[in-house]
Amino acid sequence: MFKIYIARLKGIVGDKKAMEIIKNALVVISAGTNDFAINYYAIPTRRIEFPHISGYQNFVLKRLDGFVRELYGLGCRNFMVGGLPPIGCLPIEMTIKPQSGHTRACVEQENKDSVLYNQKLEKHMRQIEASLQGSKFLYANVYDPLMDMIQNPIKYGFKETKKGCCGTGLLEAAFLCNDFTKTCPHHSDHVFWDSIHPSEAAYNYLGNFVDAQIRGWVKV
């Protein structure tokens, strides 16, 4: 897909200008949440292949490494890579894995897994940057701001942190949230839109947080 974009860009502005645009562009990579929440925690196949979470984390990082190097080969030089959110606090995870007494609470082990992966990711990005001449990498921390919204909702104007706005808010996501699905009356009260994705209000705060990171990085 990106190769097609480059070809189209060259057709519009010419080869030299196109590669200059690609070189100076900021490539934003957001990946990993579904790899863990769905492909590892929900579906047993990967857990059989990687019985220890650390092995699967390294597998995901290796795939990311290859993807980044391919983009570098196409001319990209500036990368922002987003870390994992507190996966254990996603409504769907709280539903699937209720805590003692069947209470809805964050799955702490999954949050610990997210923190460990983010630490590995940040370290790996420094290693990639050192190996790819002229490249620059920014680690986008989304874990801390989202966790702060969950732990201190009043500070951000939220009232609901454990359920999404779509449907029951417990399991619905993707195609299960459609024109026929009921939604909450005030979506800005919710940290989550569905059982996996943050609401528009939460994304607004996350966007401002990441924007501040980018602006600080650009000045370096």
Image (tube, rainbow, N blue to C red):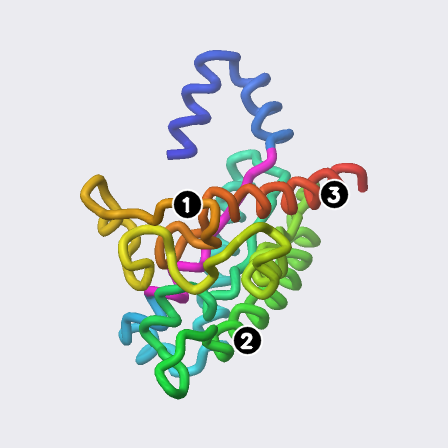
Q: Which residue is mark 3?
A: 217
Looking at the image, is mark 1 or mark 3 earlier in the sequence?
1
The amino acid type of the residue labelled 2 equals Lys
Q: Which residue is mark 2?
A: 112
Q: Which mark is residue 96?
A: none
Does residue 29 show up magenta in the picture? Answer: yes
Quadrant holding the C terminus: top right
User: Height in image: 47 above or below 168?
Assistant: below
Hey, which residue is sitting farthest left in the picture?
180
Q: Secondary structure at mark 3?
A: helix
| Image depth: mark 1 or mark 3 in front | 1
How far apart marks 3 and 2 lie (CA) works out to 27 Å
Looking at the image, is mark 3 or mark 2 earlier in the sequence?
2
The amino acid type of the residue labelled 3 equals Trp
**Callout count:** 3
Q: Which residue is mark 1?
A: 186
Looking at the image, is mark 1 or mark 2 earlier in the sequence?
2
The amino acid type of the residue labelled 1 equals His
Q: Is residue 34 left or right of residue 133?
A: left
Please report the residue visible at 58 percent of the width from the left and 18 percent of the height from the top.
16
Please report the residue visible at 44 percent of the width from the left and 72 percent of the height from the top.
56
Q: Is residue 9 left or right of residue 98?
A: right
Q: Secondary structure at mark 2?
A: helix
Does residue 161 show up magenta in the picture? Answer: no
- Residues in magenta? 26-38
